[in-house]
Image (tube, rainbow, N blue to C red):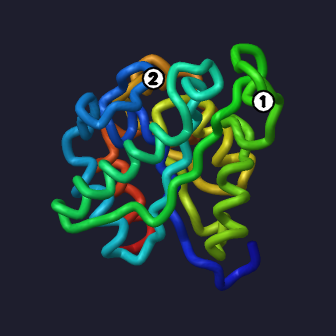
Amino acid sequence: MSDGGRAAVFLDRDGTINVEKEYLHRPEEFEFVPGAPEAIRLLKEAGFLVVVVTNQSGVARGYYDEAAVHRLHRFVDRELAVAGTAIDAYYLCPHHPSHGIGPYRAECACRKPLPGMLLAAAEDLGIDLARSWIVGDKGADVAAGLAAGCRPLLVRTGYGAVEENLVPPGVTVCDDLLAAAREILAAAGV
């Protein structure tokens, strides 16, 4: 993306925004990581686009369909509206190269650690990737961000405490999304 595009913060969903629950797709099982709505609000108030990029291999495995993911995201939107904030866009990868069924069993460019979701969002939303960040709880999130040209942050929530020692040197590690948001705002001089 050329200079002049908008700065964004890409957020992994499971383990970063919400408490990690394997194959989460039911609104009644959704639980924010403490401070996550506030973090999103702070980022939005500072002028960042906030874009969720989430691998959803449960779709590929046939555990639930894409409509269930969209229903969950609508629920998240309603919950964030109560907190006075919002997500600008959601991108999901429903594929898995070896555990998928039917058309979802596929090598794709969107499954993190590949940067396809970030590149698609940059194209769709006019995002300057060099001015943008990604926050996630896995090395795959960090790798996708680096491949797209974003600055990565790893959070210790979800799988982050386990993956902390696996990320490349120089990647900042924060306790949670709220701490990561504060780190981003400080780096941006906001």
Q: Secondary structure at mark 2?
A: loop
> Which residue appears at 62% of the width and 32% of the height?
140
Q: Which residue is mark 1?
A: 103
Q: Classify residue 104 by image quadrant.
A: top right
Placement of 105 over or under 17, stated as above or below = above
Q: Secondary structure at mark 1?
A: helix
> Which residue appears at 27% of the width and 48% of the height?
36
Front residue of 181/16: it is: 16
How would you rate the neighbour count of disc 2 (Cα within 10 Å): few for under 14, some for 14-19, many for 20 or more? some
> Which residue appears at 71% of the width and 20% of the height?
100
Q: Which residue is mark 2?
A: 23
The quadrant of the picture occupied by the N terminus is bottom right
Question: Quick check: can you spot residue 182?
Answer: no
User: Whole-percent x and y of residue 5?
Assistant: 64, 79
User: Whole-percent x and y of residue 46?
Assistant: 36, 75
Query: What's the distance in space between the residues labelled 2 and 1, CA to CA?
Result: 19 Å
Name the amino acid type tagged 2: Tyr
How would you rate the neighbour count of disc 1 (Cα within 10 Å): few for under 14, some for 14-19, many for 20 or more? few
Name the amino acid type tagged 1: Pro
